[in-house]
Image: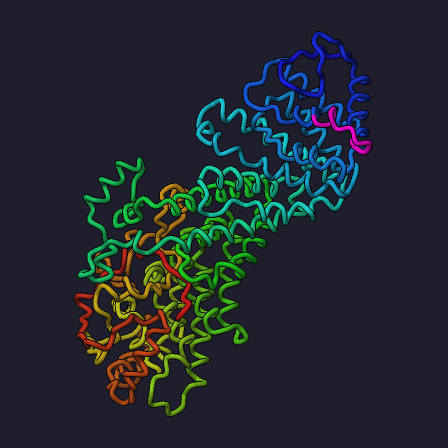
Amino acid sequence: MGVELATDRPGFYEMVDVDVSDSELVYHVRDALKSVSQGDSDHYNQLIAVMHYTGRLAPDEVAMLVTSLKALSGSISYIDIIHHESLLSSIFGMSMWNYGPDVMDALVELIISLAASNGKFVDSCLDMLVRNFMPPKSYLDLLGHPRGLARKHEVLDRVHSALSHIADLVPLAPMRLTPIILQRMPHMFDKEALIVIYVESMLLLESSALGELVGSTMLMALVDRLIDLDVEISWDDIIHEDSGKGIFDMELEDVDDIIDHAEIDGFEHPRGTAGSQILGTNAVADKLDSLMVLICEHLKSCADGERLTKVFETLLQSFWVTVLNAYKSKFSQFVMFYACSLDPEHCGERFAVFLADIFVCRTHPALTRMSAVAYLASYLSRGKFLPLSLIASTLKRLVDWCLEYCHVQNGEEKTINLEAHRVFYSGCQAIMYVLCFRMRSMMDSHRLKSQLLHMPLEPIFCHQLDPLKVCLPSIVEEFLRQAKAAHLFTVSETFLFNNLLESDLSKAFGGMERLDMFFPFDPCLLKKCDRFIRPSFVYWSMVKTTYDDGEDCSSEEDINEYFDGNGKSYMESGITRSLDEHDLDLDEFEYQLNKMSITPRNSLKNGLIFKLENPFRMPARIRPSTSPESL
């Protein structure tokens, strides 16, 4: 077999219409390589020039490049990392995106041969292949066209095949590959197309045979990148509501606006949800959205391939290390939510138990425990896929812990110390929040209703630490309204909260200044990944409360045993006592407010009277949350 070389470009072969056999070609290349050490670099330089052939190559130029690459593959033992540095640099600098299939195949063969021949070449070979995860920037516009997509598949198929071959030939290659991939990850401010195509290759590696060795690192690195993008999204890009509205009024969007956006988006938005209308055009959010779509699709493929259980453990570890305490995380946590929705029986329960274990463990830092219970409350409230039995059992764990805490704190403390009891308050608020969403469902089940009625809620909420006074007033209002309708305990018609911790309406839930919002699985506002979350998500508009339709969820027989001898429940007698018995240091309290997200800021300005007949409505969509760095 031979090749006829003819070209006008200066190159290794200064021949016209000359047949050169493959063996002769190899000898010519070897001579060129050996001549360098003897001081003769002419043929060597011509060989390097061939490696720089780019652009629209004529058929004879393609033939010259292909045969030269193949000849180099047959001359691997003659290549020296020092004497032939320029040649190696040219080879490793080649982009397969610039060539056709014949050149790609010859180049891949050469790269594999180099990596297998000498350990000194392994890192450079791996780096060259990883750089080919991405096309030249000038090629990005073509990725949206059939020709560009075809070239993408041609390149990436060969790149990943080469990585697999090298891993088979060089056992240490996967270990060397991981840091290269992490180092070459595009910056979060690079073009979205570059980031997306790189992440696609990372996910391909995770699901390949190499995934056994590098998969967990790939997933954890991707979650880290999600967080990097997430925290770059400013709340100013998300929240544009009227600051004069109350928080729950802001959450309930006008139905006409929702319908308009539903028509634009092409799918139906549940009544009372804003869909994507709050989050405007934002380049960083678009990148985050695209990456979350890729990861969700990957998780779905893992579930279909029965790999999700193993992958979920990596996600759980990444959540613990990266997401749980990440300040201002708004959307990244929904990767966990979606993974749990794919396997409620294992992953769904595993996540709930994981969060509850963190909360009740006294060895964890307070902020970590508070963040965990915030995630837990939001997760139990929003996961449509979660069985009520799991929600009830987890709720009981929270109640039992809070009750034990109350027993330990039965002293004569006269001043509420928010800093000292912040974990307790976060637990109380989590209980109330979950019951706002799930009380009616539990009351409709005879078994769960019995469990709920036997939970020691009154001793907790009537305790001298006054959780009803400290927790978010709107959550307390909704909880008490539903509790009254369910006869969970008896309450008076009107609650008079002296110095109730109420913010200036627009700041009631963190607002524009604090942003210490604390229900992390509030509706996701990202447009593209919404389709993965929405089918498994409970919106407030879907919740049937205990007071809906004026129905009474508990019979008199159910509740008689919960009254004291005077016909009053512990809750009634506890709530209606004067709150003035505590010497509340307002300055200290206000300082603590700035460190806790369970209480709104600027809340001591005005004491308000709340009536159960006209409580604030629960939100149809609460704005996305941040892990409470300053809880």
Question: Considering only vertical position in the picture, is 1 above or below 548?
Answer: above
Question: Considering only vertical position in the picture, is 29 above or below 412?
Answer: above
Classify residue 37 as left or right of residue 269.
right
- Quadrant of residue 109 in the image? top right
**Main secondary structure along the magenta-highlighted residues:** helix
Magenta residues (range)? 36-45
Residue at x-position 26% and y-position 47%: 271
Nearer to us in this view, 134 or 376: 134
**Quick one: which residue is furthest to the top in this view?**
17
**Residue 563 placement (x, y as % from top left):** 30, 80
Nearer to us in this view, 546 or 162: 162
Residue at x-position 31% and y-position 38%: 267
- Can residue 485 be seen from the camera position used here? no
Question: In which quadrant of the rendered image does the N terminus lie?
Answer: top right
Classify residue 545 as left or right of residue 293.
left
Residue 144 in magenta stretch:
no
**Residue 72 placement (x, y as % from top left):** 75, 27
Q: How is the image coloured?
A: rainbow
**Residue 169 placement (x, y as % from top left):** 77, 38
Question: Considering only vertical position in the picture, is 523 above or below 207?
Answer: below
Q: How many marks?
A: 0
Classify residue 474 as left or right of residue 13.
left
Residue 38 in magenta stretch:
yes
- Can residue 68 be seen from the camera position used here? yes
**Residue 364 placement (x, y as % from top left):** 53, 72
Residue at x-position 28% and y-position 49%: 278
Classify residue 261 as left or right of residue 356.
left
Question: In which quadrant of the rendered image does the C terminus lie?
Answer: bottom left
**Quick one: which residue is furthest to the bottom in this view?**
412
